């Protein structure tokens, strides 16, 4: 198998595991609220966003980690943590186990996202990287879609069964173990300028606000559907899967979008999210939820 094909498969599989960051426990938040009814709604919603605490810490430490471990070793650790720690609540049915699972899985997400970009710049020539970054977004969309749809179906057999969907991360681990070369291509790293500058900090600040509003939708949509529309977890899974489908569409079209919009790509992604929230505000019921999910999916994918 050619090196570029092997790298492409690994990029896709790592992104697929990373896509579970978006899924989280979103399709079953309503069920989690019922299962742990002694806890407030805010505490239950925290379980969706809890991984971000370790994601931020791990991302800040990633430079230190990459100086000591290869991209392959870090990718293996990330995908294994996502697969094993994500499925932990299936074995231990307690709120404490869920907290530990959600916290530890943040390490996997915190490494998987940035390391995939590093793998692309380390193993792929500059003229071909745009396609691989698009593949990365496609993998994220499919991972999130799989988590929502398969997880929603598994949840029909009980809340604990939902967590089994994280075992897909183990498949990503195996793909990286078998296919990703250990040594990067030194000639591709030589042309990278990785200095921090004002643009980096500006985009980071914009990303904070963008993520804040997108998460507001993701952490509330499942509960809203469960309380106001239907208690069927499959409906929540389908609604969030539409968001993932939109991410997939944007990933496939990303090269063309960037080619046409250029520097306007980031503002476009922000205004797309605003259009989704407008739909949720003015269109009642499941239709508004679906419109918001679709446009927020496009926005999230494009911004990433």
Image (cartoon, rainbow, N blue to C red):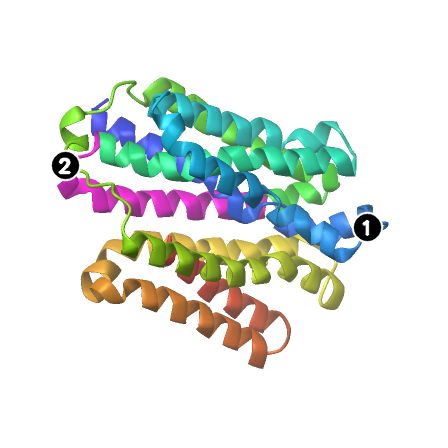
- Nearest the eye: 189 or 27: 189
x and y, in percent, of residue 142 in the image: 44, 45
Check disc 1 and report its element: helix, strand or loop: loop
Q: Residue 247: where, in percent of width, then height? A: 41, 55
Q: Nearer the viewer, mark 1 or mark 2?
A: 2
Residue at 51 percent of width and 31 percent of height: 169
The answer to if 138 sits in the magenta stretch is yes
Q: Main secondary structure of the magenta part?
A: helix
Graded by Cα atoms within 10 Å as few (under 14), some (14 to 19) or many (20 or more), the crowding at tag 1 reads few
- Residue 245 sits in quarter: bottom left
* Residue ID at (57%, 72%): 287
On the rendered structure, is 181 left or right of 25? Answer: left
Residue toward you, 207 or 79: 207
> Residue reaching furthest bottom?
282
* Relative horizontal placement of residue 192, taking residue 197 as reference (left or right): left
Q: Nearer the viewer, residue 120 or 280?
A: 120
> Which residues are the magenta region?
123-150
State the image coordinates of residue 166 (x, y, percent, origin top left). 57, 34
In the image, what residue occupies the spot 58% across and 77% down? 281
The answer to whether one can see residue 303 in this image is: yes
Q: Can residue 175 be seen in this snapshot?
A: no
Q: Which mark is residue 191?
A: 2
- Quadrant in the picture for the N terminus: top left
Tell me the residue that label 1 is attached to.
Answer: 39
Residue depicted at x 44% and y 29%: 172
Looking at the image, residue 225 lies above or below residue 74: below
């Amino acid at each position: 198998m050619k090196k570029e094909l092997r790298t492409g498969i690994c990029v896709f599989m790592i992104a697929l595991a990373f896509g579970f960051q978006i899924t989280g426990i979103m399709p079953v938040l309503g069920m989690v609220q019922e299962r742990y009814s002694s806890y407030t709604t805010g505490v239950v919603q925290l379980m969706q966003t809890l991984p971000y605490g370790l994601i931020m810490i791990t991302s800040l430490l990633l430079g230190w980690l990459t100086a000591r471990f290869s991209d392959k070793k870090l990718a293996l650790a990330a995908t294994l943590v996502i697969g094993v720690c994500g499925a932990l609540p299936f074995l231990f049915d307690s709120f404490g186990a869920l907290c530990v699972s959600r916290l530890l899985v943040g390490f996997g997400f915190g490494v998987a996202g940035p390391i995939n970009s590093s793998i692309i710049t380390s193993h792929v020539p500059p003229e071909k990287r745009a396609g691989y970054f698009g593949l990365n977004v496609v993998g994220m969309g499919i991972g999130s879609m799989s988590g929502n749809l398969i997880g929603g179906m598994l949840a029909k057999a009980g809340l604990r069964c939902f967590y089994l969907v994280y075992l897909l991360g183990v498949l990503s681990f195996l793909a990286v173990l078998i296919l990703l070369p250990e040594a990067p291509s030194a000639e591709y790293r030589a042309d990278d300028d990785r200095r921090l500058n004002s643009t980096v900090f500006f985009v980071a600040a914009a990303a904070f606000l963008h993520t804040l509003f997108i998460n507001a939708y993701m952490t509330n949509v499942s509960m809203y559907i469960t309380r106001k529309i239907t208690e069927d977890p499959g409906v929540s899974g389908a609604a969030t899967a539409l968001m993932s489908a939109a991410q997939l569409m944007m990933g496939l079209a990303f090269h063309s979008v960037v080619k046409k919009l250029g520097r306007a790509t980031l503002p476009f992604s922000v205004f797309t999210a605003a259009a989704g929230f407008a739909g949720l505000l003015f269109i009642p019921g499941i239709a508004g939820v679906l419109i918001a999910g679709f446009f927020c999916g496009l926005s999230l994918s494009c911004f990433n």
